[in-house]
Amino acid sequence: MGLVSSKEIAKALNVSKAGFLGTFIGWIVLKVLRIDAINRLYDNNKHLPDIDFLRGILKDMKVKYEVSDEDLKRIPKNGSFITVSNHPMGGVDAILLLKIMLEVRPDFRATANFFAQRVVPVESIIIPVNPFENKKKEIGSLGAFEKCLTIIGEGKPLGLFPAGEVSTIKDGDIFQDRQWGRSPIKLIQKSQVPVVPLYFHAKNSNIFYWLSGISGFLRTARLPSEFFTQKKKIVKVRIGNPISVKDQNGHTNIEGLSNFLREKTYTLANSYDETFNSLK
C-alpha cells in the first residue's frame, strides 16, 4: 500500500460520502497530482531500513549530489548540533539532508512535515511538525518543541528547515526562503549548541513558482509533481563551518539571530567556484 489512497483524498475533498463516485474523484486527483507515482516510488523501497531507503529513492530518481570532502569534515563527529538549511525543493532536499547527515552521524534527527510520519523506514528519525498551523507554532505543536530539546539534551544532532515551507521569494537568479519562523530560532537560542548551515543549490520548475504566485493551495498541490522534476538532476550542496554558541549569543533577539543564521546559509550560495571532489 502506498502513502496516500484515493479514499483518503476523497475524504480530504469532502466527497467520500458520494461512495464510488467520490473514490473515483479521489483516484483522478491522485493521478493528476502524481501522488500515484509517489506511491509507487515508496512501495519500491519501503522494505529498506532508513538510510538504505533514502539511497533507494535517490537511485530510482537518478538524483545525484556533489559535496566536497572538505565540507563533509565540517560536520561534528560528536555531540549535539543543529543544522539550518534553505528549502528550495520541498522533498529531495530533505532526503539529501538526511542521507548526508546519517552517513556521518547515524543518530541524526530532523523535523519534517507531519505527513512524513507515514514514511515507515524513517519514522524514528523524524519529528513531525504541521506547517499549516499558525506560524507561531511551527515547532511548538504536538510537543515537537520539547521533543527537539530532548534530542539535543541526549547529545544528538538535529536538522531544521527554518522557513517551514518551500522557497518562493525570487532574488536575482535564485529563489529564497520566506522569513524564517520564530519557533526554530527560539529552539536554537534555548539549545545553546553549535549551528551548521547547509545550502542546496537547486530550484523547482517555473510552473511551481507561477502557481505559488496565485495561491498557497496550488503551490502545495503542485509539490508531488515537483518531486519528479528533480529526476536525473545533480544537486550541489555546501556545508558551512559550525557557528559557535558565542557567535550566536552576539545576537540577543530572535530577528537578529534569524538574519545572522540566514545570511551564513545564503553566503554558501556564492561558493560554487570551488572544486567538488565527491560525487555520490
Image (cartoon, helix red, strand yellow):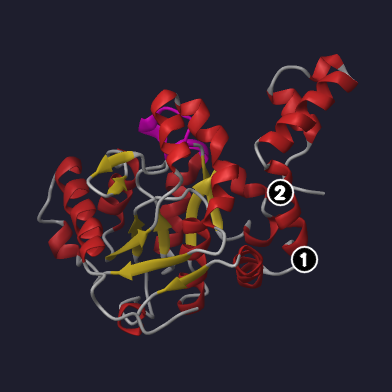
Q: Please give the label number shown on residue 37.
A: 2
Left or right of 207, for residue 136:
left
In depth, the one of 269 and 148 nearer the eye is: 269
**x, y percent for residue 15:** 76, 17
Pointer 1 or 2: first along the chain: 2
Q: On residue 227, which mark appears?
A: none
The residue indicated by pointer 1 is: 47
What is the secondary structure assignment of the residue under circle 2?
A: helix
Classify residue 243 by image quadrant.
bottom left
Establish if 107 lies above or below 265. below
Q: Amino acid at mark 1?
A: His
Going by the picture, which residue comes out furthest to the front? 206
Residue at position x 71%, y 56% from top? 42
Q: Amino acid at mark 2?
A: Ala
Q: Which residues lie in the magenta part? A: 131-142
Task: Report the residue that reaches farthest toward the left.
Answer: 250
Residue 139 visible here? no
Between 256 and 28, the residue placed more toward the observer is 28
